[in-house]
Amino acid sequence: MKYAFAAMNEKFANDIANWRYDDIYSFYDMAADAHDLMDTKNWRDVIKAVLAEDAELVGWAAFHTENDEFWLSLYLRPDLTGKGLGEGFVSACVNYAISRYELTRQTIRLRVALFNQRAVKVYKRVGFIETSKIIRDTHIGPVDFIEMEKHVAREPVQFWPLPPINMNRLSPPATRNSVHSATPWDETHYTVMLEKQ
């Protein structure tokens, strides 16, 4: 399956803010905790929209450095979870990080809620290992998290540019000329080719 990474924009961010996860996974709903997602300063280099081959929004990821460590956060669209897509999605995000960011310690780190064992299993299959357990304050109060880490080697990753995108599909005509609804494609827009899971 191919995944493309594009700069976040207003339409994508609003769509993500309206995603709703089922049961305990409603913890990941962005409606109550969308500050970082909606901060336009993050839209070019930190937060990326993840698109399918037909330019459909299928997820998003955040790439940032904290205390000299590189961190990854990633979210698959609610209706696509539990369908065997997780491993390919995570691998695509890891490959993108290796190719586009400076990994000072040649590691990628992430945090996952302890209750989300479904995600923990996916991360382990991709090569992440558990390094510690912590408690973090969240929008619902203190939550137990696992911190995980993957050692990576900077190796060539093959990318393909996507064909031109019909912007009428991405932004409403009334707002197409606004600064937030400008074309989401920039020089960091690539697709990653992965084996279909």
Image (cartoon, grey):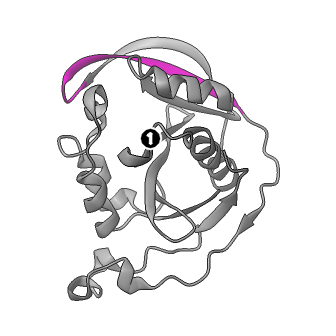
User: Quick check: is 63 in the magenta stretch?
Assistant: no
Instruction: Please name whichever residue, 104 or 83, is drawn nearer the observer in this view of the structure.
Output: 83
Query: What residue does disc 1 label?
Result: 81
In the rendered structure, which segment of residues is drawn in magenta? 138-151
Q: Is residue 160 above or below residue 20?
A: below
Left or right for 80, reference 34 = right
Q: Is residue 64 above or below residue 108?
A: below
- On the image, the x and y values in percent for residue 117 come to 46, 20
Q: Residue at x 79, y 39 (%)?
A: 153
Q: Residue at x 69, y 28 (%)?
A: 127
- On the image, the x and y values in percent for residue 35 come to 24, 47
What quarter of the picture does the C terminus occupy? Answer: top right
Left or right for 25, reference 99 = left
- On the image, the x and y values in percent for residue 109 come to 56, 30
Amino acid type assigned to the residue bearing label 1 in the image: Thr
Left or right for 180, reference 131 = left
Q: Residue at x 50, y 82 (%)?
A: 165
Q: Residue at x 44, y 52 (%)?
A: 60
Q: Quadrant of residue 193?
A: bottom right
- On the image, the x and y values in percent for residue 43 come to 39, 61
Instruction: Please name whichever residue, 179 or 169, is drawn nearer the observer in this view of the structure.
Output: 169
Tell how many labels: 1
What quarter of the picture does the N terminus occupy? Answer: bottom right
